[in-house]
Amino acid sequence: MSDQHVNPVEPYLRMDRMPHIWCPGCGIGIVVNCFVRALNQSGIDADTLAVVSGIGCTGRFAGYINLDSFHTTHGRPIPFATGLKIAKPELKVLVFSGEGDLVSIGGNHLIHAARRNSDIKVFCVNNFTYAMTGGQVGPTAPVHSIATTTPYGAYDRPFNLPFLADSTGAVYVARWTTYHVRQLTRSMVEALNKPGFCFVEIITPCPTIYQRRNRLGDGLEAMRYYKRFSKVINGANTRMVGLELKGPIIVGKFIDRDRPTLLEAMNDEFSSKLGAKYKPYPTGVSR
Amino acid sequence: MHADPKGVLTGVHFLDGDHACCEGAIAAGCRAAFGYPITPSTEVVERISQRLPLVGGVFVQMEDEIASSIAIQGAAWGGKKVMTVSSGPGISLMQEHIGLAAMTETPCVFVNVQRGGPSTGLPTLPSQADMMQARWGSHGDYETIAISPNSPQECFDLTIHAFNLAERYRVPVLVMMDESVGHMTERVVIPHPEQIKIESRSVPTGPKEQYQPYAAGEDMVPPMAPVGEGYRFHVTGLTHNDKGYPVMSAEVQEHLVRRLVDKIRLNANKIAMVEEEQTEDADVILVAYGITSRVVLRTLHLAREKGLKVGVFRPVVVWPFPEKRLRELAEKVKAIVVVELNYGQVFLEVERIVCGRTRTELVPHGGGELHDPKDILRVVEELS
């Protein structure tokens, strides 16, 4: 076998940790593939990118990706990432975790990091369930969906993640499914290279648990559903992109705007108030 | 290494303990701090928010104590010396991340200005009831270092020491102040930067591709690689092998947790810091730490006036407890009396160490005020 048969993703994976724990048909591997391709396309030196994950199936990403990587506590990768970015602004800091981690237990950190425009990128894998613990209801689970803790159907209203990120101040908000690998990769490149709090939601199949309990078929069936029911509306009003069980999925790049990052805003404020007494802190941003 | 002169306000000051603690942190090299307001520790974050921008550092008031206690750890891996500060309920919220710092060996300082509890308790009044929490408040088995200053001067000096110990042993170090020490204002002498000794974490020296983030040498403390420089290391709160990879096995758990515990326990004599007052001829030893170590000095003087041979043993570093010296004293005194603002926390440790060598008594107090020295004297008189 010659070198040309080496998977281009392999150099970025900790191959000594394979096989991974993700199930057949799980979409997280597709997201990892898109991420590595995005990293290659972004022009970023991989040594200067650190990834931070929380707990859950997606949280295991940090352990498999061959970069400086931090597998933190449940719900807390965002404040860890904020601290890391502040300490070393020349570093790119990516949070890669699931919706239960980032939006339920970690929801408070998500909205405050967006509000502050903390210069971190958040890739949120949304599979609508707590898969690692066996399929409990999550903060994005559609009404009527079945989980082990909603055996008769979920009845509380789920979060619309793009709307949440948009309304709390994120400068970049996109949503794709694992069917949209090219668009997702492009959004990841854009987010990685954009200063400020960027949020990409990735609708991802969980055939073992969420699909099975809700009679949504296997991983391939999920792809057919994403293909058939997704509608690309770039710039869509995020208020209108909420999801329903077996309903349409609005995907696209919804928000792309500029405002000062946390450290830029800090420098602006302190420089105006303290004058020459204040030496601007490095921001890692060149505009 | 000496302190960075930029952060050191050399001179004689009139400071409260909270402010002195903040100056100690900055003198120690703290350049990233995260916190959330809570009485009686708020003054520390207020002062650090004012001071850090002037010395090239960053303070961010986070959304809660949970965020503060993990933002410092991100910043520690980003290369900064870091601190967070809280009290009471805020410290309870931080416990999970004290465990994370112990597990991932992240150097960081947690300042706890103790107030009365449980729950919301007595926000504006002192207690020393978080001592056991300081040791084992997070789940799982681990060791921390806890230091207990009894004056604003010590809030300055011992906060520097806390940073140095955190860097040397790669552990969370807790500065266990209390409302009295935090809010009392006294003379604080800040020395010249060249007189302030600063320690920093050891860094790996070998080839990057061979770096194993959790492989420790004889000192049991692994070198800590800087992030963003091509080491491509992994850090996890899961049980991990020398390479930092998660491994779910009893063998790896034993290897890791044993080292986390041993690096503190086996160095306990080196970490120990004790102050003694008239213990040479004492019949009765009063054991006290923090603010209470000043209250018992009054009892000592009252007792000596009455001809009672009383001494004071003060663990400045409470965890790990300086047990060797206490055991020596236990061999030759009639009684050891623990005085603390709780219903018996350090007392349990003292009883274990003394182990029947002499009589042990507790003078407890639920907090909200300090002991009356005369109440302690009555116990001494009964035992003499």
Image: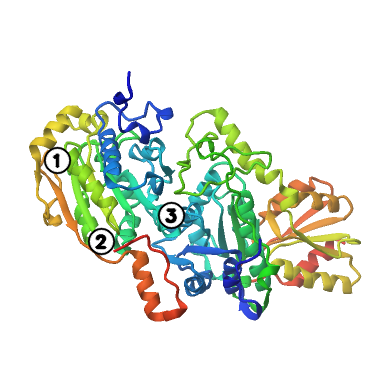
Answer whether residue B308 is visible to the viewer in this image. yes
Q: Residues within 10 Å of mark 3 (few under 14, many from 20)?
A: many
Query: Which residue lies under the disc numbered 2?
Result: A168
Rendering colour mode: rainbow
Q: In the picture, residue B126 is in which quadrant?
A: bottom right
Q: Residues within 10 Å of mark 1 (few under 14, many from 20)?
A: few
Q: CA distance from mark 2 to mark 3?
A: 22 Å
Q: Secondary structure at mark 1?
A: loop
Q: Is residue B127 visible?
A: no
Earlier along the polypeptide chain: callout 2 or callout 3? 3
Please state the chain letter of the residue tagged with numbered disc 3 in the rendered image: A
B384 versus B262 height, above or below:
below
Q: CA distance from mark 2 to mark 1?
A: 25 Å
Which of the 4 quarters of the picture holds residue A117? bottom left
Closer mark to the observer between disc 2 and disc 1: 2
Residue B359, image x, y percentages: 82, 52
* Residue type at numbered disc 1: Leu
Graded by Cα atoms within 10 Å as few (under 14), some (14 to 19) or many (20 or more), the crowding at tag 2 reads some
Q: Measure the alpha-carbon separation of dots 3 and 1.
A: 38 Å
Residue B309 in picture, x, y percent from top left: 89, 65
Q: Which residue is mark 1?
A: A245
Residue placed under numbered mark 3 in the picture? A84
Horizontal side, residue A208 vs residue B81: left or right: left
